[in-house]
């Protein structure tokens, strides 16, 4: 492959001199040949056009200067009303090639000719020609990444200067075509024209550049006004294009320009001030009249709501709304430049936290319009926003209402603070409280967008963040329904997940107050409430854990007693939150275990506690507490905040392992799901030793099911931490697992065997070698003489005496199964020692038979080579163990 790549590079080397040099000499016969091929590409017959087009594309790639001579004939074949359909097909085929599209980004005259030709080709009415022109436009939009520096003006050839338009002139030309023929222009050419206009707008300089001429600034706002009118267009694909164009044209708002102006040196204030006045004048003369037009905002909001499509039966996990599904529309809208910073900033482990159809682009659009037009836009937007919020049953209207509200609250314009006290707070609270199950994800995304930090790293808090948090923290009536409580908890989760660890004291106190409130719901009767509480506590605890060090000093100052404390009082629980959660979990787990031990009747799969005494109520609360803690753990792992919750995870590890197999089936299923996620969590530093201590404690539990769960968890834990565990910890692990080989419960002994077998495959050979020597000596000492062997059988009359001997046998089994595909030097002696126990009572005899069968299965393919490691006596013994006993022998 390297040789082929070098050969290909060498074959392409001759092309390089022609790429950057547009005046390179091309042989005359090559020019004549290319013109002949170009004429053949415009012929009537398809076979001739295809064959000539392939040859011409190769020549244009070899000699790029030829493209400039081919462009006039190609564009005239599209634009000329007298051109036939076949010539248009051939022209599209050549123009779609990569060398030609690359040339369009390097030569402004060719680009203007190409755009004029595409927009003037509507007279080709055949379906085949229109499909080819559409594919040409989409290919141009996908591959167009701007033009190189210095190419925005025509070349220095006088004849070309007279024919080619300037950049501003070309934008005006396209804009006039779209406005003059708006009613008669075909919808496809309408989209192509706006796509071309958007591509040209992306070439404009930054609006903050003081060197931009006043004419260029007026053109920018004129084009922005044109796209603003299209927001209420009845053509669906045109609205997303217009939204992107407005974000691109408006760019940095006047609000940011003012802040930038205040930070600028006094010597630079004069040109910036003049620029700001010009921007303000353009806004008031072009954008504001459009927005104040009769029913414009109402039509715009309702039209944008139509872009949110919901399929039948779409659940809360889908994100299908507000996007165009047709490939032709995707080719026009999806390949447009991205003009918004990625949102959300933090990890979203559930789709309901970022909305099913919530579009941050539309929210950013209303934010920019409000920052640009100020109170004039807010006044005319009040009534349409209130109307769509009142339409509770319309999902698309609720989604656009959430997007508009998000853009308004995140704009930070001065008029928003005044409107918040007058009508905005009440309208927001009304929208949140009346949201149904289908629209809750959209409003949660709205809340999350409004509290998102500003700046490059999101450290600057929005102006209304604190007031929004106060609104969300308003308590619910005591008679509130379960759905209303869950809705409020979801909104609080969406708000707190975006709070930065370096927030202010008032936000720290807010989270303490919310944490104190939601712990009261940990034993709520509704499962969905407990799930929401667990996720919210996980976010609150991780935020407080990260900020505890930075705020520790400030919380102990004398000015801590402020009026902010009245709104967000500090926590009344004096105990550490970590200790509070861990102690509550340990108490609940002990109560559940004690109840299961005292119960003598076998419980049904669906446990229903119907007793009204205090013990039964306390048991109910304990089960609910454990389920909430499990949701807390799952949320911490999925949200990526597990590193801050490790101390709590270690404290609840033992109760978690003991809850996987209980009479409470729902709780046990949730515990197993939690363990499935937690077993892959890495514990760093001293946390690894603490977690190992908790696991070994569970391995010594009185409940044999807990011991099995601890061994299962220990296998993956040791694998994940094999290189960071101390040797003392590894020694404790080996010691505990070896003790469990002689456990009274046979299931525990078998799990200990599998655990040891895995250990010997991957850990330090020193531990495995010492274990093999010790277990082999123990086995040989048990079967030293035949008489002793008979004494052994006579002593093993009860289960208590079988366990130690079975443990030795299982130790041999672990050694044998640790080498499934090779024959180490010690393996034949292990098999020979195992054969001595084939006549022992069950379950020892079954263990020996099963192990030998597994050994023969894994070594069947290579037995012809593996048998040389055994002596004749050993092979005879192995043959006797492998053959089944026959009645006729």
Image (cartoon, rainbow, N blue to C red):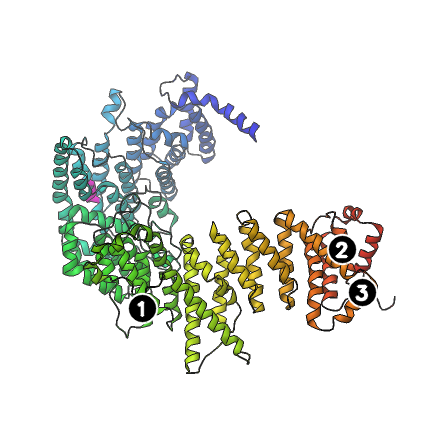
- Mark 3 vs 2, N-terminal side: 3
Question: Counting other residues with Cα less than 10 Å from the Cα at mark 1, is it few (<14), some (14-19), or many (20 or more)?
Answer: some
Q: Which mark is on residue 485?
A: 1
Distance of mark 2 from mark 1, alpha carbons?
64 Å
- Mark 3 vs 1, N-terminal side: 1
- Front residue (pair 92, 234): 234
Distance of mark 3 from mark 2, alpha carbons?
20 Å
> Which residue is label 3 attached to?
788
The spot of residue 755 in percent (x, y) is 62, 57
Q: Is residue 197 left or right of residue 284?
A: right
Q: Is residue 461 left or right of residue 619?
A: left
Question: Which residues make up the magenta segment?
Answer: 221-226
Q: Which mark is on residue 831?
A: 2
Report the quarter where the C terminus lies. Answer: bottom right
Task: Please identify the quarter of the rendering in which residue 351 is found.
Answer: bottom left
Is residue 144 shown above or below 541?
A: above
Question: Counting other residues with Cα less than 10 Å from the Cα at mark 3, is it few (<14), some (14-19), or many (20 or more)?
Answer: few
Secondary structure beneath disc 1? helix
Q: Which mark is on residue 310?
A: none
């Amino acid at each position: 492959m390297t040789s082929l790549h070098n050969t290909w590079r060498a074959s392409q080397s001759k092309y390089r001199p022609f790429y950057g040099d547009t005046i390179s000499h091309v042989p005359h016969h090559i020019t004549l040949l290319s013109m002949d091929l170009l004429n053949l590409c415009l012929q009537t017959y398809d076979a001739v056009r295809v064959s000539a087009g392939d040859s011409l594309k190769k020549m244009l790639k070899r000699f790029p200067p030829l493209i400039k001579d081919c462009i006039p004939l190609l564009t005239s074949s599209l634009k000329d009303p007298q051109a036939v359909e076949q010539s248009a097909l051939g022209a599209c085929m050549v123009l779609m090639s990569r060398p030609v599209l690359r040339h369009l980004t390097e030569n402004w005259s060719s680009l203007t000719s190409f755009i004029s030709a595409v927009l003037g080709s509507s007279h080709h009415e055949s379906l085949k020609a229109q499909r080819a022109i559409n594919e040409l436009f989409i290919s141009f939009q996908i591959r167009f990444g701007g033009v190189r520096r210095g190419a925005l003006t025509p070349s220095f050839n006088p004849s070309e200067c007279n024919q080619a338009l300037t950049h501003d002139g070309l934008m005006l030309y396209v804009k006039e075509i779209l406005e003059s023929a708006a009613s008669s222009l075909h919808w496809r050419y309408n989209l192509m024209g706006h796509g071309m206009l958007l591509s040209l707008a992306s070439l404009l300089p930054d609006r903050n550049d003081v060197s931009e001429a006043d004419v260029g600034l007026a053109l920018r706002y004129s084009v922005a006004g044109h796209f603003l009118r299209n927001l209420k267009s009845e053509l669906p694909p045109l609205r997303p294009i217009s939204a992107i164009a407005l974000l691109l044209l408006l760019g940095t708002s006047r609000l940011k320009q003012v802040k930038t102006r205040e930070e600028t040196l006094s010597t630079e204030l004069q040109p910036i001030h003049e620029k700001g006045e010009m921007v303000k004048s353009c806004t008031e003369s072009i954008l504001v009249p459009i927005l104040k037009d009769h029913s414009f905002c109402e039509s715009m909001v309702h039209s944008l709501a139509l872009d949110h499509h919901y399929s039948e039966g779409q659940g809360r996990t889908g994100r299908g709304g507000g996007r165009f599904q047709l490939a032709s529309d995707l080719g026009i809208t999806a390949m447009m430049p991205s003009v918004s910073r990625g949102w959300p900033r933090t990890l979203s482990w559930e789709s309901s936290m970022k909305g099913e159809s919530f579009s941050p682009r539309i929210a950013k659009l209303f934010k920019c319009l409000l920052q640009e037009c100020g109170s004039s836009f807010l006044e005319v937007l009040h009534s349409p926003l209130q109307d769509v919020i009142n339409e509770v049953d319309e999902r698309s209207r609720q989604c656009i209402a959430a997007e508009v509200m998000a853009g308004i609250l995140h704009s930070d314009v001065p008029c928003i603070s005044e409107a918040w006290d007058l009508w905005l707070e009440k309208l927001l609270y009304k929208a949140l409280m009346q949201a149904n199950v289908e629209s809750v994800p959209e409003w949660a995304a709205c809340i999350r967008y409004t509290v998102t930090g500003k700046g490059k790293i999101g450290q600057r808090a929005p102006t209304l963040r604190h007031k929004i948090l106060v609104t969300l923290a308003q308590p619910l009536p005591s008679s509130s329904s379960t759905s209303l409580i869950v809705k409020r908890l979801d909104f609080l989760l969406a708000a707190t997940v975006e709070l930065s660890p370096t927030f202010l004291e008032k936000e720290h106190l807010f989270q303490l107050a919310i944490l104190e409130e939601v712990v009261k719901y940990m034993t709520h009767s509704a499962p969905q409430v407990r799930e929401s509480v667990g996720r919210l506590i996980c976010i609150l605890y991780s935020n407080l854990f990260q900020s505890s060090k930075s705020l520790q000093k400030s919380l102990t100052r004398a000015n801590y007693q402020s009026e902010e404390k009245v709104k967000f009082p500090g926590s009344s629980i004096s105990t550490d939150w970590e200790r509070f959660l861990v102690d509550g979990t340990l108490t609940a787990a002990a109560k559940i275990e004690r109840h299961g031990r005292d119960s003598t009747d076998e419980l049904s799969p669906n446990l229903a506690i119907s007793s009204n005494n205090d013990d039964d109520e306390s048991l109910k609360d304990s089960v609910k507490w454990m389920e909430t803690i499990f949701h807390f753990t799952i949320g911490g792992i999925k949200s990526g905040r597990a590193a801050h919750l490790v101390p709590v995870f270690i404290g609840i590890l033992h109760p978690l392992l003991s809850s996987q197999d209980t009479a409470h089936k729902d709780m046990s299923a949730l515990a197993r799901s939690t363990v499935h996620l937690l077993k892959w969590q890495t514990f760093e530093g001293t946390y690894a030793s603490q977690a190992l201590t908790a696991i070994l404690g569970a391995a010594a539990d009185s409940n044999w099911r807990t011991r099995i769960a601890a061994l299962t968890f220990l296998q993956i834990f040791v694998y994940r931490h094999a290189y960071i565990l101390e040797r003392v910890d590894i020694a404790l692990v080996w010691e505990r697992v070896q003790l469990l080989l002689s456990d009274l419960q046979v299931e525990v002994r078998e799990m200990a065997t599998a655990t040891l077998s895995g250990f010997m495959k991957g850990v330090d050979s020193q531990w495995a070698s010492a274990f093999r020597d010790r277990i082999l000596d123990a086995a040989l000492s048990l079967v030293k003489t035949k008489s002793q062997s008979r004494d052994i059988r006579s002593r093993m009359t009860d289960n208590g005496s079988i366990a130690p001997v079975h443990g030795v046998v299982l130790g041999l089994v672990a050694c044998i199964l640790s080498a499934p595909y090779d024959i180490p030097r010690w393996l034949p002696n292990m098999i020979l020692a195992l054969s001595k126990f084939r006549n022992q009572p069950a379950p020892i005899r079954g263990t020996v038979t099963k192990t030998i069968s597994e050994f023969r299965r894994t070594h069947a393919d290579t037995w012809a080579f593996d048998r040389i490691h055994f002596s004749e006596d050993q092979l005879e013994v192995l043959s006797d163990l492998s053959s089944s006993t026959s009645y006729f022998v």
